[in-house]
Image (cartoon, rainbow, N blue to C red):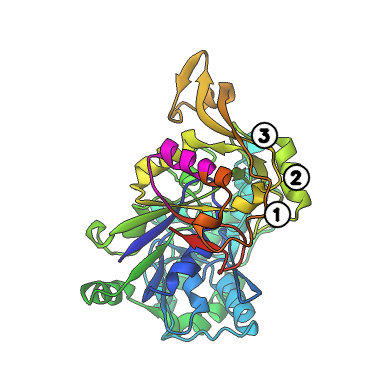
């Protein structure tokens, strides 16, 4: 079955673990959007792997992994990532990893351009990872971007890089940020590109051949629904479509290729960076941080933590067409006596069961909570859903009811084996 794995919150939901778990029955694992601003942490056989651009299926020996056309690729960062993962004993070859020749390239100056735009926004900054993702997507939309295929024509690529470097330097100089020489950008980019050249190909016919041969395709989403450029908490969003639909435009496969959508969410809510977070709770944040949890895989930043927000999850399930929920980090709530679930917002005295589009409403949104009993038991040793405490099952059942989507998987720990399948 061809399945999309998509995040239902602000990213960091544990998608990498679910993808890794489902990869056993997959033939091809595909990334379709985002860049190395995303981080997926997978723990397998006691070893921790942190992935940014590489699909999570790279940890398996017999799977094809594809970085699709919708991804923006930092060639230098990808080479560093390949080195790090190979040093952990994972073999990566051109037969195992394919990179779309239509994928746009993150150039060294994009990162400083990212910083410049954050400075310009002042108090309204987005809180990006400063990996150059937004500026690269902006160049793509403005039709001045560089694609992997363009690097094959070096004279053309050098001319484009030279022109764009000059334009970017004018912006950077206004903010006293480091400027670049075109020669250095070209040299650094081509060192990485030449190493990646064997992996670069037209991935679209490869994927269509696998689809027509009825291979199992697994689409690995990055970030989460609430960071989607269209459906997220705009303007505090990323620069790509992080919802299930982005899996088709970002890979070249049609919507008819998708047979199921697994929406991943935590048993509570987290957020990194700026933007609204109605259910944020300092006590829960402190508790989880003290457990060593909820620090960003990409930046190490502590995540804000809050109670489960079913208003956002309900909306996320709608726009993604979720056929099954994967609820992770249930064990993070093992010690709580009582748990809250936000079932609606009160905005100026009016009950809202879906998130508002008006950005000004977020400042006045007050969560309406239901309180459920905690289970006060260790769930990390549970081997099946039926072994979960009854109050944990009740909590998950209420989550499912509020989201109008069935529970498919439950995570009770970071390891691959700590995944319960219903």
Q: Residue at x 39, y 67 (%)?
A: 68
Q: Position of residue 255 (x, y in %)?
A: 25, 57
Circle count: 3
Q: Which residue is mark 2?
A: 287
**Do residues under tags 2 and 3 come within 8 Å of each other at their CB atoms?**
no
C-alpha gap between disc 2 and disc 1:
9 Å
Q: Is residue 323 left or right of residue 336?
A: left
Q: Position of residue 124 (x, y in %)?
A: 62, 35
Checking the image for residue 123, the label placed there is 3
Q: Earlier in the sequence, mark 3 or mark 1?
A: 3
In the depicted view, which residue is nearer to us: 261 or 378? 378
Q: Is residue 204 left or right of residue 415?
A: left
The residue stretch that appears in magenta: 394-407
Q: Earlier in the sequence, mark 2 or mark 1?
A: 2
Q: Secondary structure at mark 1?
A: loop
Q: Which residue is mark 1?
A: 293
Q: Residues within 10 Å of mark 2 (few under 14, many from 20)?
A: some
Q: Is residue 18 left or right of residue 206?
A: right
Q: Secondary structure at mark 2?
A: helix
Q: Position of residue 262 (x, y in %)?
A: 40, 55
């Amino acid at each position: 079955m061809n399945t999309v794995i998509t995040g239902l919150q602000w990213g960091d939901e544990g998608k990498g673990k679910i993808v890794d778990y489902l990869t056993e029955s997959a033939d091809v694992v595909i990334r379709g959007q985002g860049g190395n601003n995303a981080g997926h942490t997978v723990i397998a056989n006691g070893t921790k792997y942190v992935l940014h651009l590489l699909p999570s299926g790279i940890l398996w020996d017999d799977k094809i992994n594809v970085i699709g056309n919708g991804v923006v690729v930092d060639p230098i960062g990808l080479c560093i990532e390949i080195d790090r993962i190979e040093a952990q004993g994972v073999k990566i070859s051109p037969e195992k990893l394919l990179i779309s020749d239509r994928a746009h390239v993150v150039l060294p100056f994009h990162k400083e351009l990212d910083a410049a735009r954050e400075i310009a926004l002042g108090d309204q900054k987005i809180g990006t990872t400063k990996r150059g993702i937004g500026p690269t997507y902006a160049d793509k939309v403005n039709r001045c971007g560089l694609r992997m295929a363009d690097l094959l024509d070096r004279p053309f690529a050098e001319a484009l890089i030279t022109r764009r470097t000059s334009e970017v330097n004018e912006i950077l100089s206004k903010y006293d940020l480091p400027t670049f020489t075109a020669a250095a950008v070209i040299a650094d980019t081509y060192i990485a590109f030449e190493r990646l050249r064997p992996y670069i190909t037209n991935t679209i016919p490869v994927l269509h051949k696998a689809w027509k041969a009825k291979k199992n395709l697994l689409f690995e989403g990055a970030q989460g629904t609430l960071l989607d450029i269209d459906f997220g908490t705009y303007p505090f969003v990323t620069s790509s479509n992080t919802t299930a639909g982005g899996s088709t435009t970002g890979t070249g496969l049609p919507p008819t290729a998708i047979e199921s959508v697994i929406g991943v969410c935590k048993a509570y809510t987290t957020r990194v960076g700026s933007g609204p977070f109605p259910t944020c709770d300092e006590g829960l944040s402190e508790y989880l941080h003290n457990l060593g949890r909820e620090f960003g895989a990409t930046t190490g930043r502590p995540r804000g933590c809050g109670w489960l927000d079913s208003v956002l999850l309900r909306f996320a399930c709608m726009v993604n067409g979720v056929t099954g929920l994967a609820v992770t980090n249930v064990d993070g709530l093992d010690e709580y006596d009582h748990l809250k679930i936000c079932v609606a917002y009160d905005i100026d005295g009016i009950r809202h069961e879906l998130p508002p589009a008006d950005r000004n409403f977020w400042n006045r949104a007050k969560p309406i909570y239901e309180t459920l009993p905690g289970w006060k038991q260790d769930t990390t040793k549970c081997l099946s859903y039926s072994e979960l405490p009854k109050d944990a099952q009740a909590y998950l059942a209420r989550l499912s009811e509020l989201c109008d989507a069935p529970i498919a998987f439950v995570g009770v720990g970071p390891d691959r084996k700590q995944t319960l399948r219903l």
